[in-house]
Image: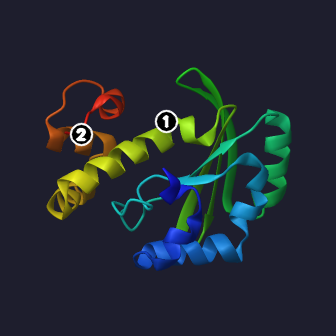
Amino acid sequence: MKRFNCIDYLKSGNTRQKALFTILKEHEIMDLLAEYDPVVVGTIPIEIDLKNSDVDICCLWKNKEQFIQSTRLSFSKNKDFKLIEKCVNGTETVIISFKIDPFPFEIFGQNRPSHEQEAYRHMIAEYNILQKQGEAFRKNIIKLKENGMKTEPAFCKLLELKGDPFKELLLYKIN
């Protein structure tokens, strides 16, 4: 979805989106990640974030070691920096986390296009549902999240979907 390909939409968004835009620009985060096709995903872009929600960025790496070296060089000086490698749904993943006040960041690097990664696909499914369901639905999602429910289960609860929330959301068809 073209809306999320560039971070410019954040500068005219809500208060947290504007703050995020400023931090991304001031710290040149998207520029530092440019060669990895970075896309900001998650709850902040679709306005269902909480005050402690992290900034998720999907990246495509073709050379894992180069990605690790590059991101370590770019972000290791930030507060709470951590880099882990793990397998997520059968896919080698590098997760870099750090904090730039007031936002915690998580960069997910995989050897698959950013727009095909699960986090991006979930965000787009959630965005489309929010567009169809409206403001009251969005507020109910936020209320469930404030009460401790994770995002995907909150959507499935309100949509009355059964089964694995991560799979069900991707299968959900908007009428």
At a point 25% along the width and 59% down the height, the residue shown is 142
Of mark 2 and mark 1, the one earlier in the sequence is 1
The kind of residue on which mark 1 rests is Glu
Task: Determine whether 13 is above or below 57 in the image.
Answer: below
Confirm whether residue 55 shows in the render.
no
- The image position of residue 86, as x and y in percent, is 64, 30
- The image position of residue 90, as x and y in percent, is 57, 20
Q: Quadrant of residue 159?
A: top left
- Distance between the Cα atoms at labels 2 and 1? 19 Å
Q: Quadrant of residue 48?
A: bottom left
Tell me if 78 is positioned left or right of 8 in this view: right
Tell me if 67 is positioned left or right of 37 in this view: right
- The image position of residue 138, as x and y in percent, is 23, 59
At a point 57% along the width and 73% down the height, the residue shown is 21
Q: Which residue is mark 2?
A: 174
The kind of residue on which mark 2 rests is Ile
Which residue in the rendered view is the most extreme toward the top?
A: 90
At a point 78% along the width and 34% down the height, the residue shown is 62
At a point 24% along the width and 24% down the height, the residue shown is 163
Q: Which residue is mark 1?
A: 118
- As helix, strand or loop, the secondary structure at mark 1 comes to helix
